[in-house]
Image (cartoon, grey):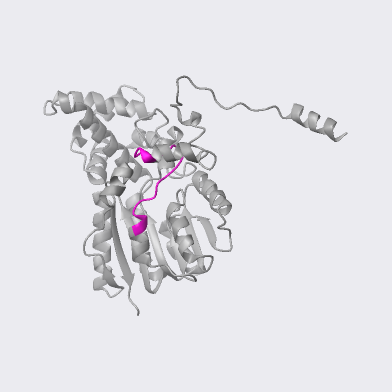
Amino acid sequence: MDEQKNTNKQQETPHKRRVRYSGKYPKRFEEKYKELQPEKYGDTVAKVISKGGTPAGMHISICVNEILDFFQIQPGQKGLDCTLGYGGHSRRMLEKLDGQGHLYALDIDPIESAKTRERMENLGFGPDVFTVKLLNFANIDQVGEEVGPFDFVLADLGLSSMQIDNPDRGFSFKVDGPLDLRLNPHQGISAAERLKQVNKQELEGMLITNADEPYAKQISSAIMTARKKGRPIETTTQLKEIIEETLAKIPDIEPAKMKEAVKKSCQRTFQALRIDINNEYEVLEQLLEKLPGVLAPGGKVAILTFHSGEDRLVKKTFKRHKNEGLYSEIAEEVIRPSMEECVANSRAKSTKMRWAVRAEQ
């Protein structure tokens, strides 16, 4: 009887074959079944990492040792990870807590935060020691009022590799996908919609302010011309093509350097749009202003930045708060990842770390 039930169950739920692909290795994101399930294919993931790559669907945390050396986390303390992402930093901080105390983590990405929460629970970090809140770190004061103050706070302002690698999120010009760029795809407008609304002057200013784009005038003019002609800019590839065509008309760029110039302008343009539609400077300003209020006396904060605009804002605010007596110490110089880390993870090269210590009174 039991055998008959099992047979009927198998017939009702037929085996689902994984996606087939052409060639020796999968190229499309959804075909990378091994890398997208790292817990099942550790050897494959290890090979990708050993070659200096980041496996699809994963994120390699940056400056982990530098952060832990600064925090000196002790069991029983209370901490906050403002940018949960893949959970790499959170995992290492939880290990230092050794089952005592509590770590809270924030993220506005409902897609990745749910995956990370499950992954952390499977590692043994349940709700008794680890809590995830779907909240923008601009609202850090709400968390502080509810569960603070904190002995240590971390904010990694970098984009998670999982978001970059997924073409459906539109963060990378290297693969075709919708030009979205929202950290929370359920809120606000996409980058494609933003380009339909922005005027030339505003777009040019955005490219300069958010990314120091040297060809901001030419790129913004080309986007406006494309819009007037009814040429769609709704995918990552369509925006990349406009940038390629624009730079090809600039005589100052040598042909041998064109490919690299296009790559850099694409990176800066996508960055500028991402910062704009996610209000990244505004939310960072709110975080920096509210940080002293959520830290316990002697509490420590570390922030990882990835471009000059972020670093300038962090440096300026930390210095002002020290002069106001809110911080007793701040980093006088930035801390950078080691040469070995940059070789192993190319995405670490632009990272800068700054820290501050809350005054005792």
The residue segment tinted magenta is: 50-65
In the picture as drawn, the residue positioned furthest to the right comes out as 1
Q: Is residue 288 above or below residue 208?
A: below
The number of discs equals 0
Q: Residue 262 at what x, y percent from top left?
A: 24, 30
Residue pictured at 51% horizontal, 44% vertical: 111
Left or right: residue 337 compared with residue 107: left
Near-viewer residue (220 or 263): 263
Residue 40 lies in quadrant: top right
Q: Is residue 35 above or below residue 336?
A: above
Q: Mostly what secondary structure, the magenta segment?
A: loop
In the picture as drawn, the residue positioned furthest to the top comes out as 22
In the picture as drawn, the residue positioned furthest to the bottom comes out as 361
Left or right: residue 55 compared with residue 217: right
Left or right: residue 73 compared with residue 336: right
Q: Is residue 154 above or below residue 187?
A: below
Q: Is residue 353 visible?
A: yes
Near-viewer residue (81 or 35): 35
Whether 58 is among the magenta residues is yes
Q: Residue 170 at what x, y percent from top left?
A: 40, 35
